[in-house]
Image: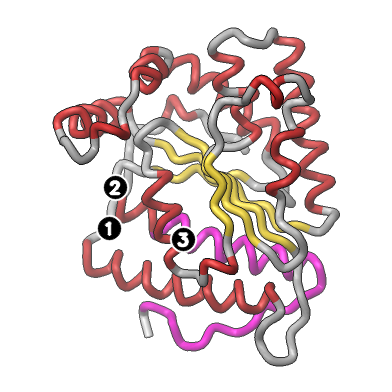
Amino acid sequence: MHIDLRTIDEYPSLGEEVAELRLEAAQHRLAHLRLFTAGVLPDTKVGPGITVVFEGFDAAGKGGAIRRLANALDPRHVAVVPIGPPTPEEMAHHFLWRFQSHLPARGAMTVFDRSWYGRVLVERVDGLIDDAAVQRSLREITEFETALAESPTIIVKFWMHISDEEQLHRFEERRDSPLKQWKLTEADWHNRKKRGQYIDAANEMLAQTDSETAPWHVVLANSKRYARVQVLELLNHEIEAGLIRRGITPPPSRGQDYLA
């Protein structure tokens, strides 16, 4: 992916009515595709697994986008896995080890709220690994995702991106709201101070780990409505593309186009 996050200075938005119509249409389409890949529709077979990865800045709207995604589906057809710092046991293994048990089987779907990319983001920025380990980890992640794609698994990755000003606004909003204070931690403020380093790390990550079978999508998320619609529409597109790459014809839309 050839994009420099530092150069982004315009963030699109959507009107409320259009956003709601497009979101509903995308949720209907996602539900249809999941039933199809799960093999539960008449005359369908179990399809590839689906792995969705969310990364991005704190307060960039990952949680809100994941909720809209998950709300479109029967809970039996999606697993949402929040990823925190590794435990001592997990640190004693290779960094990819702790993700193995969460990977989807054929016909299943897993959404990672943060992921193995913490290795080349948080651990890199905080100086927990050196440059040689960073480059080795980037290669290992690419090999890991290639193996998943051949398993077969459809992999879709989102980097949720917000401006420095919008992030500060959301932090202050959380700080001042009794119902949102729990979302804001000292670690969030710590990471914000290192925003420039995170951008540099993310730029290299996006460039080195983007591929046809495990693509990155940068979602400009200053507008929450726009970001949620983008995530659902891009996810549907990538599921369809992943099916086509495997010689499977996606089911036709059932009239849920928001322009219909």
Task: Tell me how far mark 1 sits from mark 2, CA to CA.
Answer: 8 Å
Q: Relative to 143, does residue 70 appear above or below in the rendering?
A: below
Q: Secondary structure at mark 2?
A: loop
Q: Position of residue 202 (x, y in %)?
A: 55, 27
Point 45% across, 69% down: residue: 72
Give the label on residue 180, or none.
Answer: none
Is tag 1's residue or tag 2's residue first in the polypeptide sequence? 1
User: Dot 3, how many residues are within 10 Å of its Cα: few (below 14), some (14-19), or many (20+)?
Assistant: many
Q: In this figure, which residue is indicated by the disc labeled 3?
A: 69
Q: In this figure, which residue is indicated by the disc labeled 2?
A: 223
Q: Position of residue 257 (x, y in %)?
A: 43, 80
**Does the magenta run of residues contain 164?**
no
Q: Is residue 149 left or right of residue 14?
A: right
Point 82% across, 37% down: residue: 143
The residue lying toward the viewer, choosing from 46 and 5, is 46
**Does the magenta run of residues contain 230?**
yes
How does the figure colour the protein chain or chains? secondary structure
Q: Amino acid at mark 2?
A: Ser
- For the C terminus, the image quarter is bottom left
CB contact under 8 Å: marks 1 and 2: yes
Magenta span: 229-258
The residue lying toward the viewer, choosing from 210 and 104, is 104
Q: In this figure, which residue is indicated by the disc labeled 1?
A: 14
Q: Is residue 198 left or right of residue 99?
A: left
Point 73% across, 79% down: residue: 249
